[in-house]
Image (cartoon, rainbow, N blue to C red):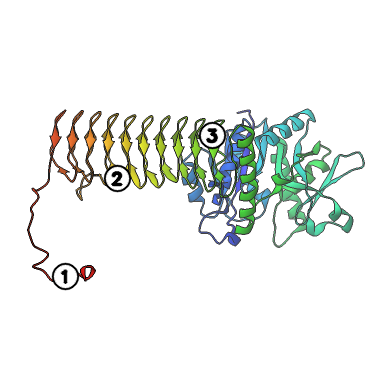
Amino acid sequence: MSSNCAVILAAGQGTRMKSSKPKVLAEVLFKPMIDWVTDAAVAAGIDDICLVTGFKHELIEEHFDGRFRTVVQSELLGTGHAVMQAKDFIKEHTPGNVLVLNGDAPLIPEETIKAALDFHIAGNNAATVISAKVENPFGYGRIIRSKDGRLKRIVEEKEATATEKIVNEVNSGAYWFSSSVLLESLEGIVEKHDKKKDKAVEYYLTDAVEVILEKGLNAAAYDASSPEIVLGANDRVQLQQLNDIARRHVLRKNMLNGVSIPCADGVIISPDAHIKADTEILPGTIIKGRTVIGSDCSIGPNSLIEDSEIGDGVVLNSVQCYSAQVKNGAHMGPFVRVRPGSVIGENVKVGNFVEFKNSVIGSNTSVAHLTYIGDTDVGSGVNFGCGCATANYNGKDKSRTEVGDNAFIGCDTCLVAPVKVGNNAYTAAGSVITEDVPDNALAIARSKESIKKDWVNRKKPYRWQK
């Protein structure tokens, strides 16, 4: 095989995160950091990826469900050692170029990956280090250049001289390598350490760059001109900082695309969400996953939309919507919950305190308030009065209810599934419907009213009557 590939380092435990999960599964805008990195690589045209895992590697493997190759770094002996675990994978892509990324550095964009590859190929480089200039370089490896601007070496913080520590161009931890040269330089790292006979041997990828330079091959640093690409997260404080930066970027991108966000307080939008122009996002609104929202919508305030498809001209006021579809012109809220599998039709009107579960609601239907509709297929033009419910679960099985077009469900009606209400049929208020209602019929299912005259005077007065 001869193609470009990527090796992503994802073995860190992240002890300071104080999490039971691998560090790379910590989320930025509800999306694991490792997903930001793999998505950037794939968007840059590299979909053949090997993940170097370690701590609880099975969780990462389960997360990707076989989408990418994985290898395990059983001992954490440095970034060079991590890449060594992927040697067989890299051999399969020789000749070619291999991208190395850190799985906990989520802010590197596809544009930087592409531009660095172009730079790498144009310079006929054996290695290209992606660098960035930062305001505070403490803790990062410094990019030391010669007078003519060429890469001279990468020096770590603890080994840097006072002069070198002033340098603000740092190593991002992302690289492009010639696959064959990388394999040779990894062997060179091992030989160098064997000669030194270090007691605690650690192999770093910067050592591979040093070996390449010593051989007289081309190695260069590509300045990405973005300090954010070097940022990672070792604890929850740094993770919050990444969230804050990513949140600002996503909001700005949406606003430049025509989305109105008059006040960004509490607004969080997934990087994978797509929102069309002329839609307004109001304060306190959270949009998660791969949600798609049409144009001319008003979303919020205080709405939560997750992995859902929202049509044009939809109003969602204090609505929670999960893995559902809301079609054009629907008006919902406040205090509405739409659970997975539901489809809300065009121009449907939903009032306060209504819940839908795995139901299909036809166009122009009205569900005013205080109603639960579960496992139900509702036609168009239906009216639900206040306090209605579909009894879809008998303690063992769940059954569906069917309501025909233009039916009228009276207040406080309970539809006990499986049951069907026909087209243009009515149910009287307070009814418990257990049998099918034919088209154009009225169903009354309640006991006859009984009046007990002078009942109050025969009883002791209640407290409020004193």
Left or right: where does residue 461 sit relative to residue 260?
A: left
Query: Which residue is painted at 57% across and 54% down in the image?
Result: 23
Q: Position of residue 92 (x, y in %)?
A: 60, 33
Q: Name the residue type under label 2.
A: Thr
Of the two numbered discs 1 and 2 on the same chain, state the one appearing first in sequence.
2
Q: Position of residue 459 (x, y in %)?
A: 11, 69
Q: Position of residue 125 (x, y in %)?
A: 78, 34
Q: Name the residue type under label 3.
A: Thr
Q: Can residue 171 be seen in this view?
A: yes
370 to 165, vertically: above or below: above
Q: Mark 1 points at which residue?
A: 461
Quarter placement of the N terminus: top right
Q: Residues within 10 Å of mark 3 (few under 14, many from 20)?
A: many
Q: Name the residue under label 3.
A: 279
Q: Mark 2 points at which residue?
A: 371
Q: Determine whether the residue tagged by mark 1 lies in a helix, strand or loop.
A: loop
Figure quadrant of residue 55? bottom right
Query: Which residue is painted at 78% across and 54% down in the image?
Result: 136
459 to 300, vertically: above or below: below
Figure quadrant of residue 233? bottom right
How many marks the image carries: the answer is 3
Q: How crowded is mark 2: few (under 14 residues within 10 Å), some or many (20 or more)?
A: many
